[in-house]
Image (cartoon, grey):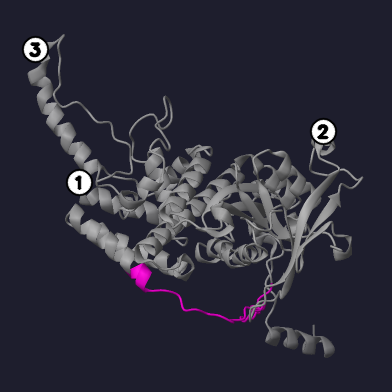
Amino acid sequence: MSTISPVIELDMNWHTPFFPTLRPALAPLGSRTTGALHQARSYTLCQLEAHLGSCLPQDLFPKAAGKENSRDCIYTRLRTFWCMLWQSFNPQASGREVVRQLQALFQLQGGPQISEEDGAYCRARARLPLGEFPKALSATAQAAQKRARPSTSLQGRPTKVVDGSTLTLSDTPKNRAAYPPFQSIGPSFPMMRIVVIFSLLTGAILQLACGNSSSADLPLLGSLLNQLVRGDIVVADRGFGNFIMLAVLQSLKLELDFIGRSARRVDGRKRLKRLGRNDWLQTWKKTSNPSLWLPRPSWAALPQELVVRVIRGSLYQKGFRVRQVTLVTTLLDWQRYPAQEILQAYLRRWRLEMCLDDLKTTLQMEMLRSRSPDMAQKEIYARLIGHNLVRCIMAQAAKQGDVPLERISFKGTLDALRQFTQAMSQAPSRKKRRQLWQELLRTLAADLLPDRSGRREPRAVKRQKRKYPRLSRPRSNFRDRPKTSVRRTKSRLRRLVLM
């Protein structure tokens, strides 16, 4: 059985070649240490690490060489990390709830007493090094990729999708200084802009870039380009389909290609070569105005013109807003990469935008609770890693049950994981835990989403806003608006000159 906290394995033979007379005295200590280590292995949060620990690196969050986190205390680095993951699976859970769960588990196993306050756990989260979180995020994305069935579209090349979004932070002075709100007057919250790269095959998040409200998506994506590997195909929306992004991808010498909607107006009469119906080659020239986010030397090194392929096709589906699109791509070989496959890849990008909806709605990442910028980034990474672990389970269930991955519900997988891990923590044997895990995968593959072809998703809100006014000033200075009856009484008294 795996463990949350790293445990030092001791040599129980207790060889003492230099002091043989001490061996009888040290032998009882060895037996007591074995029992203590055996109990420590049971201090888990719903056995998450028993089945999901293989998706993470073995050397994740090592013990510090000195000072803080250098001893095996209650809130070790690895245990604190798994507690944060448990919180990402249960977004409404507070730090106090994590402490209560650890209290119950330690009391069950006869472990040491834990303080009722959650201050020690909060300080342990703040001490976690931020540099370990991107490693865990990349490892979970690779684990999901291995568990999924390979794709045969676009010559089987790995396809990465780029998208951006904004998040709301807690209204604290530190968050406002690092991530200013969009508006400085009236009720507002600190806003963080994020750009993510996720896999088109599995929906797992690969990389993350964060910025403030004044940051643009293109510079944030530029900071992630060094994470791409040879042969990748980048799929993005209209905000990224410009000359600069295509030229930068071509200049990396990694055989990177791009598929996306064009940010400039495309004139089919200026085509360079006709490849088929609504499919042609065209020359894009570099503008005289330099890029605002690209350094001048890099801008000067870009070519003066670029040959791109333009595909205009219909993606009509009942319920979709966009009926016809004009795509630009650097996949110039029309025989290896047919136009229909490129259109279908872009159509899948629309469906995989639901990955961000899973994060912001199901995992409730739209409003972060952390009160400092450093903890806000750790909270984001914890939600993304939890999202990837759920995607690993979905990919494994889809492959084992031979069903499409898109038909497995993210919310249903998360709910099933919560309930089955509760049962696994009470299972009497390792064999029973394996049976419960296989039953979880079988249940996910059997409970598929219905085929909602033609379902309309209008951008409208059904629930009305509340009647209460917005909190537009600090709580200490805010005064409630008098009730309607009180305002009418005062108005009548003013008319009668009685007040």
Q: Nearer the viewer, mark 3 or mark 2?
A: 2
Number of numbered tags placed on the structure image: 3
- Quadrant of the snapshot with the C terminus: bottom right
Name the residue that disc number 2 marks. 297
Asked if one can make out residue 194 in the rendered structure from this viewpoint, the answer is yes
Contact (Cβ within 8 Å) of mark 3 with mark 2: no
Choose the circle earlier in sequence order: 3 or 2. Answer: 3
Circle 1: element type: loop
Binning the other alpha carbons within 10 Å of mark 2 as few (below 14), some (14 to 19) or many (20 upward) gives: few
Does 346 sit left or right of 419 as displayed?
Answer: right
Spot occupied by residue 44 in the image (x, y as percentages of width and height): 30, 49
Circle 3: element type: helix
Asked if one can make out residue 426 in the rendered structure from this viewpoint, the answer is no
User: Residue 62, relative to residue 281: is it above or below?
Assistant: above
Dominant secondary structure (helix, strand or loop) of the stretch shown in magenta = loop
At label 1, which amino acid type do we have?
Gly
**Which label was assigned to residue 21?**
3
Name the residue that disc number 1 marks. 110
* Residue range (magenta): 443-469
At label 2, which amino acid type do we have?
Pro
